[in-house]
Each structure stands twice: as structure tokens, then as C-alpha cells.
Amino acid sequence: MDSKRGFTLIELLIVIAIIAILATAVVLILNPVVLLRKARDSQRVSDIKQIQQALQLFHYNYGRYPLSGECGATIPNGGWSNSIQCLSNGRWLRDSTYNLSQFFPVDPIDPVNSPNSFPTGPAYYYYSRNYGNDGQWYMIVYRLEVPNPEIEGADGVTAPNGTYFHYGNGTNGVVTVGKGR
């Protein structure tokens, strides 16, 4: 009886397949494009948190949120403000009377901030009108480049009249946040 044992062809193919899968995963994880997208997404999440804190301070000081739609934006419609069409002197979160200058040197904008269609374009969109009470609620819509089900699954805003807003579908990277009723 021969005591020499070796690997079968199937065993070798399985090991090669596992190594190939692991190598592919490492390349994808360390891919500079993916890392750059994730970095921009981290910036977006941080920006939105800062904006929300400033809006809460604004509401505390003035008893309302800045009204949207007073900057001539057309995307998605005239009732909204966005970080592309409304940006002027570092401000896009403003109405005809107030802006967030006491809370920010300049308003945060999307790291890419280029025109595209709502809500999938790389921009920040702000709305604070209608649905029960102008300026007493708001929503911000933005898009992540790398979908994040944890963030996307926890979003959504309910307006004072009970209307629920959730522009994303949980997988397309679109996030709706804000302060409702």
C-alpha cells in the first residue's frame, strides 16, 4: 500500500477559487475609486449632521426654520432650495430674511455638487414649506454614492399635516432626513 498522499485536482481548484475570491475582495475594498466615494459619503453624512444642528439652533433663536424656495431654484421645483442653484456668497440655506451665517462660516455643500436630476443628483436639497406649517418643519434630501442600507433604512420625515416623505427606496443611496412633527 502506497503511503504517499497528495491533493486531488478538485481540492486544488477549490483552494485556487477561494484565493481568487479573497484577492478580488481585497482589490475591491482597497480600490481607490470606492475609497474616494466612501470618503465623500462620510463628508455628506457629516455635513448633513452639521446642517441639522445649525437648523435646530436657528429654530431655537427665531422660532422657525429658514423658508425654502426664496432663491430662484427650479430643481426639483421653486419651493425648494438646493446647494447648486441657491449658492451665493457661500450661502444656500437662506430665505429672504435670514441665513445660517451665525452658525457656519459658509454653508456645507455636497463634495461633488453638480447639477443633475432630483433626488439622484449630487447636491443637497432643502424644503421647509407647506404641509401644515411653513418653517415649522424641514427636510433635507441627499444622495450617497455607495448605498448604505443602515442609513437609508432609518430615514424619512413626517410633515406637520401627517404627510410622510421618503424619497429613497432603501437601495438607491437617496436619504431623506429632517425635523417633522
Image (tube, grey):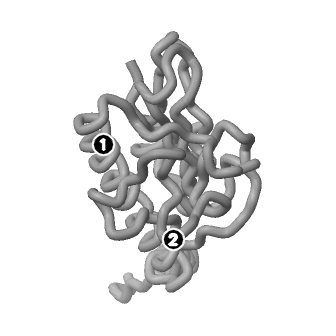
Which of the pair 119/2 is nearer the observer?
119
Cα–Cα span, label 2 and label 1 = 19 Å
Residue 137 image offset from top left, x and y in percent: 43, 28
Q: Position of residue 93 (x, y in %)?
A: 48, 52
- 106 relative to 98, above or below: below
Percent position of residue 21, x then y: 52, 74
Residue at label 2?
Answer: 89
- Which of the image's four quarters has the N terminus? bottom left
Q: Which comes before the other along the chain, label 2 or label 1?
A: 1
Residue ranking furthest to the top = 161
Tell me whether circle 2 and circle 1 mark residues in contact (CB < 8 Å). Answer: no
Examine the rendered structure and indicate whether residue 47 appears above or below residue 174. below
Tell me which amino acid carries mark 2.
Asn
| 137 is higher (above) or lower (below) than 102 | above
Q: Amino acid at mark 1?
A: Phe
Residue, x 58% and y 64% (percent of image)?
Answer: 87
Sort mark 2 into few (<14), some (14-19) or many (20+) by Cα contacts within 10 Å: few
Please tell me whether mark 2 sits on a helix, a strand or a loop.
Answer: loop
Q: Residue at x 51, y 25 (%)?
A: 134
Residue at the (42%, 73%) spot, across then down: 39
Q: From where the camera sits, is residue 105 visible?
A: yes
**Which one is nearer the viewer's eye here, 63 or 16?**
63
Identify the mark at residue 58; answer none if there is no mark: 1
